[in-house]
Amino acid sequence: MNKRLDPPGLALVPITLRAHLSSAIDFFVFGTVWCPARSLSASSLISAPACLTVRSAIPGNLTLSAHIMEVNAPSFASPLASVRAGHLSIPSQFDSVIDAVNNASPWTIAFTVLAILVAYDQVMYIRNKGSIVGPAFKMPFIGPFLESMNPKFEEYYAKWTSGPLSCVSVFHKFVVIASTRDMARKVFNSPTYVKPCVVDVAHKLLGADNFVFLDGKPHVDYRKGLNGLFTRKALQSYLPGQEAVYNDYFERFVRITKDAGGKPVPWMSQFREIMCAVSLRTFCGYYISDEAVKKIADDYYLITEAMELVNFPIILPFTKAWYGKKASEMVLAEFCQACAKSKACMAAGKEPTCIMDAWVKNILASKEWVEAEAKGLSTENLEKPSPLLRDFADYEIAQTVFAFLFASQDATSSAATWLFQTMAQRPEILERVREENLKVRNGDTHAAVDLDQLESLAYTRAVVKELLRYRPPVTMVPYMAKRPFPITDSYTVPKGAMVIPTTWLALRDPDVYENPDEFNPERYYTGDAEEKGAKNFLVFGTGPHVCIGQQYAQLNLVLLIGKASLMLDWAHHATPRSEEIKVFATIFPMDDCPLTFTEKKW
């Protein structure tokens, strides 16, 4: 019989059996083993499952092979159907549920799964929200993501004033906002519970192993090695490079106005470029070419664009984060090349002129001291570095310098923009700055200043500090909860949530600053704002991650506005949007600060 009804043969021979044929055909069905499209050996037939003899009247419009294939066609059995057919005892109450799922269409199943996910997303949001201020419900999955792509200061301000603690949830990220001075300080000073995270995409742009993301003892040890870069001696060595940049760009400011026919030009981008240039010269000296400085200043805009508070979870091609990643790779490559040049110069015994030089010199001095001790040589003629530094690779130094640029670029660009606008609007204050700076230079408008002279400019320093209070560049500083964080007696920030201390309300506290919405340098020059507002001045943060370069940043702005007051006259061409605030990582005037510049005539 096997020879007559060889299964592979039957699959290939179309034998049409008409309906009038009443004879029955005996054929073998070997369960799921028989596939008419492949041949079976004798052994496979013998070892097949039990054969079933089936007497079947084949419809007249089918070939035998077609009928056999129809009989043996694979089928899918619902898991629920299998459960019902099995030995499990299922209560009859579930019959309707089993039938509904068993008969559901793919679309029904998809919508059911989606509904379950939406419900889960809402439940988790409500659970995390607890008793603090926030939307009653979350827009499924994305939350206020679309609004975050075009952030508005007014919306941020409304959130800050809604309560000491408030929240939002975007994608998978739950965000708690600490708005008051005390809540903000608690976050800054709770390293046991939180660590800096900047924004989600920052790890991908700066490098996940960048020192700004270090926590605990590794962060403390790393930071000790950087403290020497901001000593008085170090700050003094950076001044010549800063003055050279300002001399060059102030001449350029005058040319830009002339080229525009004396008409006002939005100056925000120019301030971003000049502050990037002065940062690069301070950090890397002249190891970076003028062309590279211009390239980095232009492309850094892409990095800033990518640093939105909440990004799409992955970097997609041709998005802001993607362009930002490309720009960051270019900057790191330039910094690595600069570091190699710095190491060669410092090894040759040259004097440091930038932060990179100062760091490399300390590394070389530490290495020399350690080797001398290891060999038992005299260290009498050596100065022991404090602390002793390990050897840092070019890429490590480049990453850290990139972190310095990240910390300074947007903040100082914001401060410079508001400083020039505010001075132009208040010529009497600008005139006092001009007089003080002329006096400290003994009447020579082009004279360079040293660190002692900069620090003696009490009124100019008061102007800068009041500007930082009045228009704080950094309004929010993202941290991440490493563990459940009991920030109050009644609320605990969940582990993994982003928790953001804000600075705006602390700097506008009417109990500390009289008429806080007014720009008044006298509060720092002759008033008591320095002492009274010691806990409120959170411009540079506080706690273990307080800004390491805050003294450098303030003196740099003092040098900027003091030198500009002697070399330039400028006018602000106000628009209805000049005092509106645009959020672009930091804050800027909504109209980008239209100005005109001319050379100062004495």
Image (tube, rainbow, N blue to C red):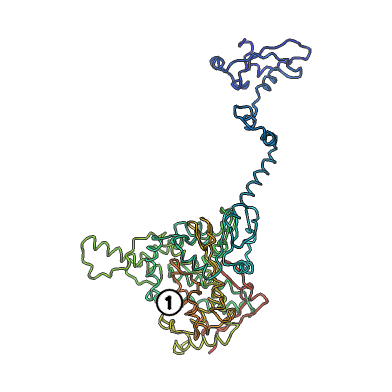
Residue toward you, 6 or 128: 128
**Residue 63 spot, x, y in % from top left:** 72, 18
**382 displayed left or right of 499:** left
Disc 1 marks which residue? 239
**296 displayed left or right of 449:** right
Q: Residue at x 63, y 63 (%)?
A: 150
**Residue 350 spot, x, y in % from top left:** 34, 71
| Crowdedness near tag 1: few (<14), some (14–19) or many (≥20) residues, C-alpha within 10 Å | many
| 113 up-or-down from 377: above or below | above
Residue toward you, 522 or 42: 522
Q: Residue at x 44, y 65 (%)?
A: 401
Q: Secondary structure at mark 1?
A: helix
**Total labels drawn:** 1
| 225 up-or-down from 74: above or below | below
Q: What amino acid type should be assigned to the residue bearing mark 1? A: Leu
Give the quadrant of the N terminus.
top right
Residue 193 seen by the camera: yes
**361 displayed left or right of 13:** left
**Residue 213 spot, x, y in % from top left:** 46, 60
Residue toward you, 478 or 19: 478
| 487 up-or-down from 420: above or below | above
Residue that extends furthest to the right in the rendered view of this protein: 20
**Residue 291 spot, x, y in % from top left:** 50, 67
Residue 326 seen by the camera: no
* Quadrant hosting residue 428: bottom right
